[in-house]
Image (tube, rainbow, N blue to C red):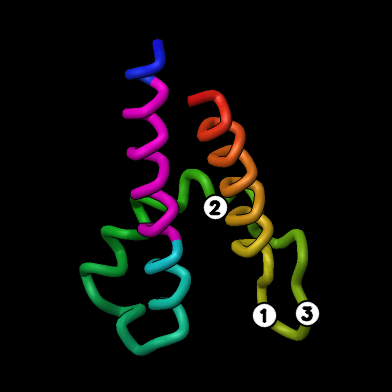
Amino acid sequence: MIKFLEIAYYVLYVYLYIMIVYILLSWTSIRNSKFYRILGKIVDPYLSIFRGWIVFSNIDFTPMLGLLLYQFVLSIISRAI
């Protein structure tokens, strides 16, 4: 069971960094690239849950909320290991 949690933790940790790269690239001109669309297909199932919750003057801050919740879940898993 511990080995499964370790593998799940590392996979989820990599997914966290993929989300961070996706969010950072959304501020650049790379948004129109194929690479960005591939990252979107990977990340959007999770981040779309939070879309549109916190929007100030056309800036959507909900990815930050999603990242905070995700990091909270990662910290719970790391404590279980």
Which is more N-terminal, label 3 or label 2?
2
Residue 16, how many percent across, how many down?
Answer: 44, 53
Q: Label 2, on which residue?
A: 47
Q: Is residue 61 above or below residue 40?
A: below
CA gap between label 1 and label 3 equals: 5 Å
Q: Magenta residues?
A: 5-19
Which is more N-terminal, label 1 or label 2?
2
> What kind of element bears circle 1?
strand
Residue at the spot 53% in from the left edge and 31% down from the top edge: 77
CA neighbours of label 2 inside 10 A, class few (<14), some (14 to 19), many (20+): some
- Is the C-beta separation of discs 1 and 3 under 8 Å? yes
Which corner quadrant holds the N terminus? top left
Residue at the spot 22% in from the left edge and 68% down from the top edge: 35
Using the image as rendered, state which of residue 14 and residue 54 is in the foreground: 14
Q: Label 1, on which residue?
A: 59
Residue at the spot 51% in from the left edge and 45% down from the top edge: 46
CA gap between label 2 and label 3 equals: 18 Å
- Determine if the magenta segment contains residue 18: yes
Residue 58, how many percent across, how many down?
Answer: 69, 82
